[in-house]
Image (cartoon, rainbow, N blue to C red):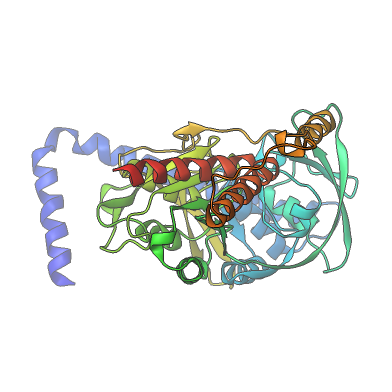
Amino acid sequence: MKKFAMAALGGTLAGVLATTQVAGPLLAQDQQRSGNVYEQLDLFGDIFERIRAQYVEEVDAGELIEAAIDGMLTSLDPHSSYLSPDDAAQMRVQTRGEFGGLGIEVTQEEGFVKVVSPIDGTPADEAGMEAGDFITHVDGESVLGLSLDEAVTMMRGPVGSEIIITVVREGEAEPFDVSIIRDTIKLTAVRTRTEGDTVVLRVTTFNDQTYANLESGLKEQIEEAGGMDQINGIVVDLRNNPGGLLTQAIRVSDAFLEKGEIVSTRGREVQDGERFNATPGDLAQGKPIVVLINGGSASASEIVAGALQDHRRAIVVGTKSFGKGSVQTVMPLRSDGAMRLTTARYYTPSGRSIQALGVSPDIIVEQPRRSPEEDTAEEEARTSRSEADLRGSLNNDSLSDDQIEQIKADRAKAEAAAALREEDYQLAYAIDILKGLSAIGSQD
């Protein structure tokens, strides 16, 4: 400790000797700034006492101070805030993957609550909430002018109770109400399945379970397919994933990278910056990867998409991501509450900051909204007749039974792909890319 103090003192002394002519004015400026801060704190204390003594109703001093702290933090940016002891406890539960609520990730924009994304399989998702929706009222009460935490508190309630949310949605002429029944939200961080010859990893959030779920799920799908040789590629679906833990985003990125930088963070001071690098090992064993993103992909999702895109390890498909390129640190406070403070921006391996810009896909693919007219037209097209349906048509006797079975199997795959295209056009597009890459590779 003495060595540190002495080094600091030496540096200070050298600075004073080198700047003798300006040290006086600089010192005066520092003293003036300190004086201004103390004056402002005195002003705060004066206002606090006047409220306690003269406000029309008696106020709780603790709640008043908490409100002042929260106001100070929320004035900085949409992601800094004060967490009461209850809120801090709930946040710790959420990172473990189970909590009570609606199942939506929200932010604040122009005074209204904006949905970043609904979480798969939750009440909000099943009720039809969409990324980009604006919530204007909760049970008939306006949220305009409330802080984000206050609006979220309005949306909380007992499991099984109903909440009516008024929504403004792009493309809809009038606001409309959505009824949601609150429930216990159990997050499955990664859902895995195989579509044809492609493994689909649906990553819904980045919590303590994410990497473990992804690793075990991918291994299981590969074994069921008969080995990696039977897989043509992997789709990492990050659509409507609001983010979560930075450490998990790094581990998921590292799962598919052999080396190189994953992400860097830069804070206010240069020495506070950090770089995180990949370690050897690729769970996909070099197989091609497509990453799916949309406007509901935020924060940790954007770290993964940006890292795999910059290293050209994956093709990014979909629409521009949300654009949350900042890092929040949760700092425990003596009251058992916590402070969530924006402490850094993060940068992709190429040095891009995606703050407010988002990750731009390599291939932009919108998710089309279907109309009843289109459904009817496609249904008619599917029921059209072919040569084989004609009475007395010739049989094809040039094929063996095995070849005929193979054609039927290929046709079944094609029909399944067509059905998926109607259900989820973006995912079908991603799978088609991997099919094309596989076809090219098999000709080499």
Q: Can residue 312 be seen at all in this image of the molecule?
A: no
Report x, y in % for residue 243: 54, 54
Q: Quadrant of residue 132?
A: top right
The quadrant of the picture occupied by the C terminus is top left
User: Measured along the vertical axis of the image, is residue 395 above or below residue 368?
Assistant: below
Q: Nearer the viewer, residue 205 or 24?
A: 205
| Residue at 44% from the left image edge and 34% from the top image edge | 362
Q: Position of residue 22 (x, y in %)?
A: 19, 33
Q: Is residue 92 visible?
A: yes
Q: Where does the N terminus fall, quadrant-wise?
A: bottom left
Quarter of the image where one finds residue 25:
top left
**Up-down relation of residue 390 to residue 328 (above or below):** above
Compared across the picture, whether 284 is left or right of 322 comes to left
Q: Position of residue 365 (x, y in %)?
A: 56, 33
Residue at the spot 83% in from the left edge and 60% down from the top edge:
58
Is residue 336 shown left or right of residue 349? Answer: right
Residue toward you, 52 or 341: 341
Q: Is residue 410 left or right of residue 184?
A: left
Which one is in front, 80 or 287? 287
Q: Count numbered badges in the picture.
A: 0
Q: In the image, residue 328 lies at what x, y percent? A: 48, 54
